[in-house]
Image (cartoon, rainbow, N blue to C red):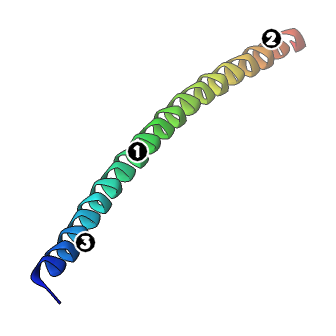
Amino acid sequence: MEWYQVLTIVAANLGLFLWSVRQSRNDFLHTCRIIESIQSEMKEFHGKLERQDAEFKSHLKYANHGKREGDK
């Protein structure tokens, strides 16, 4: 086997390795962005859920308070 053939094989493998590393990094960054967006959506959802729960409890408290006064 000639040296130019060895160098061609080494260069091709090095190129494929570098391309693979770059693709892996891009996939990792894309996955991180997706996870961050899901986490922000979860925070927004839980915030809305807490506000809704607080409003519901205040309505129940008001309704129960009104019934007690009406019973007296």
Say whether disc 2 or disc 3 marks the residue closer to the N-terminus. 3
Q: Is disc 3 placed on a helix, strand or loop?
A: helix
What residue occupies the far bottom of the structure in this picture? Answer: 1
Q: Is disc 1 placed on a helix, strand or loop?
A: helix
Q: Nearer the viewer, residue 63 or 22?
A: 22
The residue to which callout 1 is attached is 30
Alpha-carbon neighbours of circle 1 within 10 Å: few (<14), some, or many (≥20)? Answer: few
Say whether disc 3 or disc 1 marks the residue closer to the N-terminus. 3
Looking at the image, which residue is at 29% across and 58% down? Answer: 19
Q: Quadrant of the N terminus?
A: bottom left
- The kind of residue on which mark 1 rests is His
Q: Nearer the viewer, residue 69 or 19?
A: 19
Q: Which mark is residue 13?
A: 3
Q: Nearer the viewer, residue 67 or 44?
A: 44
In this rendering, the answer to whether 10 lies above or below 53 is below
Q: Judge from the rendering whether residue 35 lies leftward or rightward of residue 65; answer left or right.
A: left
Q: Residue 31 in the image: state x and y as whole percent.
A: 43, 48
Q: Is disc 2 placed on a helix, strand or loop?
A: helix
- The kind of residue on which mark 3 rests is Asn
The residue to which callout 2 is attached is 66
Q: CA distance from mark 3 to mark 1?
A: 26 Å
Q: Judge from the rendering whether residue 48 lies leftward or rightward of residue 1; answer left or right.
A: right
Q: CA distance from mark 2 to mark 3?
A: 79 Å
